Amino acid sequence: MRCPFCQSLESKVVDSRDTESGIRRRRECLSCGHRFTTYERIETMPLWVVKKDGRREEFNRQKLLVGLLTAGKKRVAAQRLGELVDEVENRLRSERVSEVPSQRVGEMVMELLREIDEIAYVRFASVYRSFRDVSEMRAEIEEMLAHPPGTQRPGARRSRPRGGSGEELALDLGK
């Protein structure tokens, strides 16, 4: 492992800890003595997202995180949104499938985001569901208020997003 301070390739592991997404290692450079942290993730098989138009794209954590950072701007800590992306990826991988519809990813993100911050949820949903006008957004907010996070939402919308390419927008927020 290359030291970020002196670029030496000689270091020793001082501490290792398992995390939900891999291994955290605390290292000490044998040349300069500085300590630094590395995160290792287990290499897994690619997870493909199937878009509405049939295109397949490899699951991109960074792309999803950028969209969530935009929705949660000034509301949700970046670290918490990173944890949400970890949770989504872990849930998808635990299903042991190689492909997942983009609608599934979007709905899963909205379900988890709603429990964290309702404003960020509405921001994300407004792009993901491609609201055509304010009345559609109002209806979503009224449904959200009638059924707080953690309660069963009768008739909860699990359908495809309306409009052109809503699910692609959800994963392309911030671009």
Image: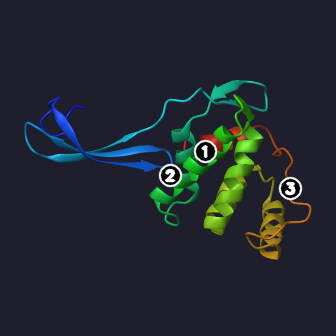
Give the Cα separation between the discs numbered 3 and 2. Answer: 25 Å
Q: Which residue is mark 3?
A: 157
Q: Nearer the viewer, mark 1 or mark 3?
A: 1
Answer with the quarter of the image where residue 53 lies: top right
Q: Secondary structure at mark 1?
A: helix
Judge from the rendering whether residue 43 lies leftward or rightward of residue 148; answer left or right: left
Q: Is residue 170 left or right of residue 24?
A: right
Return the disc, 1 or 2, that comes first in the chain's sequence: 2
Q: Residues within 10 Å of mark 1 (few under 14, many from 20)?
A: few
Q: Secondary structure at mark 3?
A: loop
Residue type indicated by callout 1: Asn
Real-space CA distance between mark 1 and mark 2, rounded to the nearest whole angstrom:
12 Å
Quadrant assignment for the N terminus: top left
Q: Earlier in the sequence, mark 3 or mark 2?
A: 2
Camera-nearest residue between 55 and 166: 55
Which residue lies under the disc numbered 2? 82
State left or right for residue 33 relative to residue 122: left
Task: Name which residue lies at 73% across and 34% down.
Answer: 100
Q: Residues within 10 Å of mark 2 (few under 14, many from 20)?
A: some
Residue under label 1, please give it: 90
Q: Where 154 sits versus 129, above or below?
A: below
Compared to 135, does 101 lie above or below?
above
| Label 1–label 3 contact, CB within 8 A | no
Residue sitting at x 61%, y 66%: 116
Which callout, 3 or 2, points to the residue nearer the camera? 2
Q: Residues within 10 Å of mark 3 (few under 14, many from 20)?
A: few
* Residue 33 appears in the figure: yes
> Residue 160 placed where, x, y %?
84, 44
Q: Are marks 1 and 2 in contact (CB under 8 Å)?
A: no
In the rendered image, is residue 166 in sight?
no
